Amino acid sequence: MLVTSLPVDSTMSTFSGHYQQAWQMSSSFQSVRSFSHDCQPQTKIFIFSVPTHCPMCGKCVDQSSVTSPVARYPSPFLSAHGVPYSLVIKPTVSDFLISYGPGQNLHTGLTTSKGSVYSFDESGVHLESTGWHQCLTVPLVEEYDEEMKNGWDGRLAEAAVEPQWCRERYQDDGHNCFDFVISFLNFIGCNPIQPECNQPITRENFCRDLIMPVTSRAAGYIGIYQSIDKYGFLVQQTAKR
């Protein structure tokens, strides 16, 4: 079975500050790795941990029989609680790696300076400091933008108590978590899609330019992870040189 290529994690030391913390907080799931065995050198085998015997031929896996270095692939998921000033995305039900599939609903929120998450659903607005440990994240504020950061938490708290976000106003398709995020970003003049543009963010470009890119990049990783979890391994034919 052919699988989508993934970026290799050559060094996790490139994570710094909040992002290193966020990765550590979300790393309870197994990492995806790959190697090639001399039984089929042009085949890449994806696994969670290198086995003692090749899942394809049954022969021993040792230093002499591995024909390519073991590669480790970084998870695209972080803990929202270690990523401040960000858009965070998770499945409405369960999580990405275990049970998420195409077409299932997503839930979005906004993180405070401390990594707590404001989100809106059928119960109203919530402020949560736990429960968002496997998310896709989109940073919204530049590190040097002190003016935006200084007012961020206060403005989020103000938005959370606006009457339009009471539970009675919630609608699955027309007034939901996406609208809460879009409304807040437009309210404070934060447009990560076109920072120099004064035009408000619309639902269309929010989905197209913020949600779709990160979910599309994660789709290959999710598919590989779920296949390994189900079958024990997955193979990819590499191009012959």
Image (cartoon, rainbow, N blue to C red):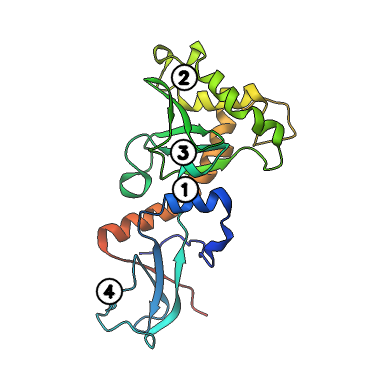
Q: Badges 1 and 3: C-beta atoms under 8 Å apart? A: no
* 23 relative to 122, above or below: below
What kind of element bears circle 3?
strand
At which x and y percent is residue 47? 34, 67
Residue, disc 2: 175
Q: Which residue is mark 3?
A: 89
Whole-number angstrom distance, CA of label 4 to CA of label 1: 30 Å
* Mark nearer the N terminus (1 vs 3): 1
Look at label 2 and name its amino acid.
Answer: His
Residue 96 is marked as none
Q: Nearer the viewer, mark 4 or mark 3?
A: 3
State the CA–CA distance, disc 2 to disc 1. 27 Å
Q: Residue at x 73, y 31 (%)?
A: 197
Q: Residues within 10 Å of mark 2 (few under 14, many from 20)?
A: some
Q: x%, y% of residue 96?
A: 37, 45
Residue position for label 4:
55
Q: Is 241 placed left or right of 93 in the picture?
A: right
Q: CA distance from mark 1 to mark 3?
A: 10 Å
User: CA separation, marks 4 and 2?
Assistant: 49 Å
Quadrant location of the N terminus in the rendered image: bottom left
Please say if the residues under marks 3 and 2 sit with CB atoms less than 8 Å apart: no
Q: Which mark sits nearer the N-terminus, 3 or 2?
A: 3
Q: CA distance from mark 3 to mark 2?
A: 17 Å
The residue that disc 1 covers is 78
Amino acid at circle 1? Leu
Q: Tell me if 164 is positioned left or right of 130 in this view.
A: right
Tell whether label 1 touches label 4 (CB within 8 Å). Answer: no
Work out whether mark 4 precedes mark 1 in sequence or the reverse, and give the earlier one: 4
What amino acid does circle 3 point to? Ile
Q: Who's the residue at 54% across and 33% down the image? A: 112
